[in-house]
Amino acid sequence: MALDRFDRMLLNLVQQNSSQTTERLSEQVPLSPSAIQRRLKRMHENGTIIRECAIIDPVKIQRSGLFVVALQVEKERPEMLARLRSWLISEPSVQQVYYVTGEADFMLIVTARDTDVYEELMARLISENPNVRHYTTNVALKVVKRGLVIPLDVDPG
C-alpha cells in the first residue's frame, strides 16, 4: 500500500500519542476529522497499524529489571526454531525477540521484577527448550531511550 503525505503525517502523530482525537489530529494534519478517521481505519484494516498500546513506567509498577539477552541455539532446524519462537512469544516477560546474524541467534529484551525472577525465567527457558545451547545476559543499568517509533518522511524523495 502506498502511503501519501497525509498518511505519513498521521502515522508520525499517532506513534507519538495514539489517544489523540481525530479533531486534535485534524489541527495538525490539513484534513477533516472524518477523513482522518477513514484513513486510520484503513491503515488498521490493511495492517499498517498493527496495534495500539499504553506505555507504562516500569519503576511505578516495581518491574524495573531490564535484561538484554543473547541466545544461541544448538541446531537451526526449522521445527526446533519454531518451537523456541512459540515459547518466547508466549512468555509475557519477553518483550521483544529478534532473530539475528552474528554469534547469537536471537536477541531478547526481557523485563522482570528482579534478578531472582529473571533467573527463574531463564531456568525454565533452558529446561523447556533443549535446543538452547547458551545465553548471555546484559543487565540494563539505566534506560537512556525506549521506544518503537519508526520515523516517516512526510515527503518521500
Image (cartoon, rainbow, N blue to C red):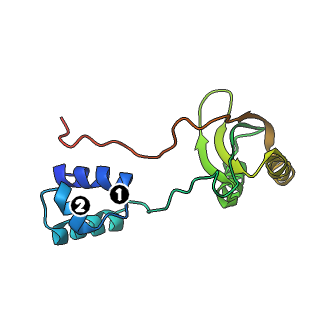
Q: Which residue is mark 2?
A: 25
Three-letter amino acid code of the residue under disc 1: Thr
**Rendering coords of residue 52 (x, y %):** 44, 62
Q: Is the residue marked by circle 2 packed among few (<14), some (14-19), or many (20+) residues within 10 Å? A: many
Which residue occupies 59% across, 36% down?
A: 100
- Which quarter shows the N terminus? bottom left
Which type of secondary structure does the marked residue at label 2 adopt?
A: helix
Q: Nearer the viewer, residue 144 or 92?
A: 144
Query: Would residue 72 be seen by someone viewing this image from the given angle?
Result: yes
Which residue occupies 21% across, 43% down?
A: 154
Q: Classify 81 as above or below 42.
A: above
Outermost residue, front direction?
60
Using the numbered discs, state the Cα–Cα distance from disc 1 to disc 2 in whole angstroms: 18 Å
**Rendering coords of residue 50 (x, y %):** 42, 60
Q: Which residue is mark 1?
A: 48
> Image quarter for residue 71?
top right
**Rendering coords of residue 90 (x, y %):** 67, 61
Q: Classify 45 as above or below 28.
A: below
Which residue occupies 35% across, 57% down?
A: 48
Three-letter amino acid code of the residue under disc 2: Leu
